[in-house]
Image: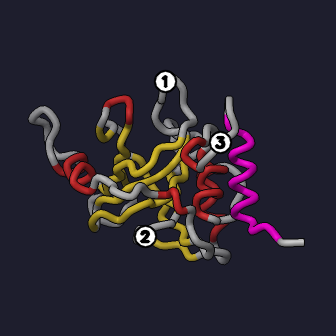
Amino acid sequence: MKRIPRALLTLALAAATTTGAQARSLLDYVGQCVPFARAASGIQIYGDAWTWWGQADGKYERTHKPKEGAVIVFAKTTRLPMGHVAVVSRVVEKRVVMLTHANWSRQNGERGHAEQDVTLFDVSPRNDWSDVKVWYKDVDGLGGGVYPVYGFIYGKAHAAPELTSRNPDYVGALIDAYVPVSGGPIAR
């Protein structure tokens, strides 16, 4: 009997929990960020998103430098009572990356959907990825909130191939991060 890799089983579980028709791809997923990040990255950590940083200690490499396939762990806050996890899909430049994640923006009035290649901007004063702004579909740009981040967890397995699109919008990500909106200050 052929053994099925754990990441594929996780993806199958995530797909089985989608609403409506069964997911045909990782991007059809609807649900919480944790099962999505686990399936997309291959990192086998369970529990609330904010606990991933502590759980990764001694099991996975933890760092403050983004790389493709790494999971970024958002801290627990009033706005994010369970934290948030997302997977880096592309590194655009030292302060801008693209994420693929679930359960952030509303789509058709509901949360939970997967989003591919959304902008994440490091707004920390020391350029250490401790504070970020995230692209938010509801405003078609970076949201107004700044979110504290613990750091990045590097997985040992290969990330899902659907993590990024064939032609991600690098220019759009840079514009999201660095071009002032409506004459306002740069999002720092």
Instruction: Give, as a single range, the part of the protein colored magenta.
Output: 3-18
- 135 vs 77, nearest the viewer: 135
Q: Is residue 76 visible?
A: no
Residue occupied by mark 1? 108
**Residue at mark 2:** 67
> Residue 153: x, y in percent?
54, 68
Q: Report if the CB atoms under discs 1 and 3 are less than 8 Å apart.
A: no
Residue 90 in the image: x percent, y percent? 38, 62
Question: Residue 122 at what x, y percent from top left?
Answer: 32, 57
Q: Residue 123 in magenta?
A: no
Which mark's residue is nearer the viewer, 1 or 2?
1
User: Magenta stretch mostly in which secondary structure?
Assistant: helix
Q: Residue at x 75, y 68 (%)?
A: 5
Can you name the residue that lies furthest to the left here?
A: 183
Residue that badge 3 annotates: 23
Please state which of the two labelled residues, at mark 3 or mark 2, is closer to the viewer. Answer: 3
Amino acid type, mark 1: Asn
Distance between the alpha carbons at the discs numbered 1 and 2: 31 Å
> Between marks 1 and 3, how big is the CA–CA gap?
17 Å
Amino acid type for the residue under numbered disc 3: Ala
